[in-house]
Amino acid sequence: MPEVILSAHDLVKHYPIRSGVLRRVTGAVKAVDGVSFELHEGETLGIVGESGCGKSTLGRLLMRLEEPTSGRVVFQGEDWSSASGAALRKIRRNIQIVFQDPYTSLNPRMTVGDIIGEPYEIHPDVVPESKRRARVQELLDLVGLNPEHIHRYPHQFSGGQRQRIGIARGIALNPKVLICDEPVSALDVSVQAQVVNLMEKLQSELGLAYVFIAHDLSVVRHISDRVGVMYLGRMAELGTEDEVYDHPTHPYTQALLSAVPVPDPTLRGKREQIVLVGDVPSPANPPKGCRFHTRCWKVQDICRTEEPQLIMQPDTIGAHRSACHFAEVRKIVETVDVSNVPLSSVVLSADAAEAAAHDHPSAPTLP
Amino acid sequence: MTTTTQSRADAKAAAAHAAYQPVDGRLLDVENLHVHFHTSDGVAKAINGVSFHLDQGESLAILGESGSGKSVTAQAIMGILDVPPAKIPEGHIRYCGQDLLAMPEEQRRKTRGPEISMIFQDALSSLNPVFPVGWQIAEMFREHRGLNKSDALAQAVRLMERVSIPGAKARVKAYPHQFSGGMRQRIMIAMAIALDPAILIADEPTTALDVTVQAQIMSLLQELQQERKMGLILITHDLGVVADVADRIAVMYAGRLIETADVYTGYANPAHPYTKGLLDSLPRLDQKGQTLAAIPGLPPNLLKMPPGCAFHPRCPLARERCREERPELVEVRPGRFAACHYTEEVLHA
Ligand SMILES: Nc1ncnc2c1ncn2[C@@H]1O[C@H](COP(=O)(O)OP(=O)(O)OP(=O)(O)O)[C@@H](O)[C@H]1O
Ligand SMILES: Nc1ncnc2c1ncn2[C@@H]1O[C@H](COP(=O)(O)OP(=O)(O)O)[C@@H](O)[C@H]1O
Ligand code: SF4
Ligand code: SF4
Ligand SMILES: [Mg+2]
Ligand SMILES: [Mg+2]
């Protein structure tokens, strides 16, 4: 396996809850509560989980947009929190982020050229000033936008195109790691596929490693090499794409997988459905012991008192990490390998589609 | 609740429905519907000649990408479009044979709730934040069925129990913000089915919810539909949800229906390049090593619709004829309709 490029060590982020007239701290939202993992060079680590489980907070901690309450983030052996000077600049340059909402994450008063070139203001050494415009146009071209649109504003682009602008900015500094927080969630299916394909192309061309945060388990399976499943601020299960989707050992992963609808009516009623009762508890007051015990159908006494650790558990093909006292494989998804099935003649190949998108880049809102 | 209260409520319900009787099971016939929005930039032709039907107990899914006209179609059926800016220059919407568009507003208002009702994507903004939820449900029984306060509240509790609100009796006085997103959606559903409508329109009922909650809500909706033999119009962009619940699908693109089919044939062998494109661009949980065939380009701007087939700038099969002549929605196989000049090529692909 390639070298570890970024790692999280027992990351914790608690947000204080204040109440009363004195705004005294009366508790804490435990948004991220002890998360560790490793990201290897050039790989995609998917992070899935339901809303509020701490995915975005984790992304912000990795980017150091926020200070962790405790724990460490290490980039190529260098600790984020103790790094300074050149080492710190190197880390900052090499970890970049792409946000979910293409409608609000771009400054509406800046041109596309200024948005994509903004990182060079902070890291002027990466591209000399005289070459910046050309570099920005190169980036526009790389993400499938018309390089001549460098002077346009975000509102003149569609959602999918804005997401491409966000990606272009994210890769402007040639980072090693791109944190993507729900990068395609706001997009329509057909446009979502364009952006996913673009991200895969950029990864293979530029050797980027992705932390791909999303709630859509199908998209995450498609793009990820390894996957982490989060529940209430902690990692419930962590393994390769096959291990997590085909050999899940954590009850929460199993329930989550069983709830995802598959676009094939012939499977109706044939797929196993594990219906969870109740809602996700509040992260301000997570259940003691195993956080999932209030909704778990396998719960035993020990689950209410002892927190299970994320440790290697047998999964019939080997072992991968899972945080459950009673971890056990339950097959939920009947996976079909379609790597060798050619696309039918009617549809364009992914590459041709990409090229065609490039030929018609004008947004519908343009005059 | 006493038996007399219940039978009183039931009798009133039966009387309320007497005016509308489906003929041969046919509940709804939408015919050549057009909806335009008059904006400062010009006339946006949101719906351009949409026709479909719905039978008793049937689930019809209206599929399509953002802006394709799904919600506007639903709002036109419900009669809740803002007029102006909206205008319906042409078309008929027949409910049990009677044209809703030709009805006096007072008569039409009385169909909203007891005959046709709707649930929306965002439950929080459709429930009134300042009234207890039980009161909001009870109010419908008071207004439409003339029940007294305690009978109406008893019905509200019964419905909240039906949609599995834990501790319904104790929570009948709670306010919307005191419920989770999933429970609010259950309450919305309770309100929508309160008056036993013949048609339930669900516009993206689970889009804002997590997948485990979505599964709960969809199975509740299906149960209720079967129990009450409602016709269900499910509006969504999620091809997975549709595959689980729909009998028939109707696919919209740029304000037109481009394909209708029963769900099994539609998915297995689409007749329109756009439907095929949607299916091929979707990542699947149960597939490995999949190539996503993205549809190039973007849906058109309603103010500047391309001539001919609106899909032609994105269509891999497009040729000269597609740029000039708009394909009509025609029967391409028994019970299957598509609007494409080259549908045979798609069917045989
Ligand atoms: N009040 C309005 N004024 C002007 N245009 C409108 C208005 N309401 C809707 N439209 C336009 O009508 C078209 C269809 O809108 P509609 O809401 O039906 O889309 P939809 O298919 O439901 O999309 P989504 O999946 O995003 O909900 C869109 O182009 C929309 O911008
Ligand atoms: N700045 C903040 N202050 C207080 N609570 C926060 C803050 N940011 C996030 N949270 C809370 O932390 C939890 C995890 O949030 P988030 O990481 O955004 O979840 P996700 O991205 O998985 O949906 C949620 O309960 C959220 O409300
Ligand atoms: S530790 Fe216990 S409660 Fe937690 S997931 Fe495992 S069986 Fe369920
Ligand atoms: S009519 Fe032509 S452009 Fe339209 S969908 Fe059919 S082949 Fe494509
Ligand atoms: Mg988030
Ligand atoms: Mg809509």
Image: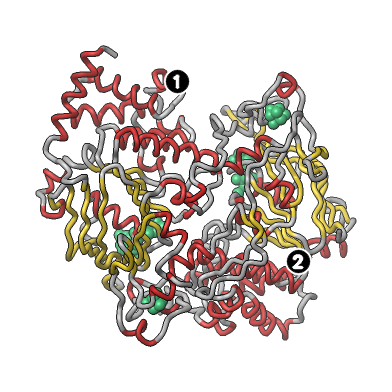
Residue type at numbered disc 1? Gly
Image side of residue A192 versus residue B174, left or right: right
What is the chain letter for disc 1?
B
- Up-down relation of residue B94 to residue B46 (above or below): above
What is the chain letter for disc 2?
A
Q: Quadrant of the C terminus of chain A?
A: bottom left
Q: Quadrant of residue B336?
A: bottom left
Image side of residue B294 versus residue A41, left or right: left
The image's mark for residue B167 is 1
- Residue B58 screen position, x and y as percent: 31, 46
The residue located at (26%, 58%) in the rendering is: B52
Which residue is denoted by mark 2 in the rendering? A208
Using a 10 Å C-alpha cutoff, classify the residue at mark 2 as few (fewer than 14 neighbours), some (14 to 19) or many (20 or more).
many
Residue B209 appears in view:
yes
- Up-down relation of residue A67 to residue A187 (above or below): above
Using a 10 Å C-alpha cutoff, classify the residue at mark 1 as few (fewer than 14 neighbours), some (14 to 19) or many (20 or more).
few
- Up-down relation of residue B131 to residue A145 (above or below): above
**Tag 2's secondary structure?**
loop
Are labels 1 and 2 on one chain? no
In space, the residues marked 1 and 2 are separated at their CA atoms by 51 Å
The residue located at (51%, 78%) in the rendering is: A361
Image side of residue B187 versus residue B196, left or right: right
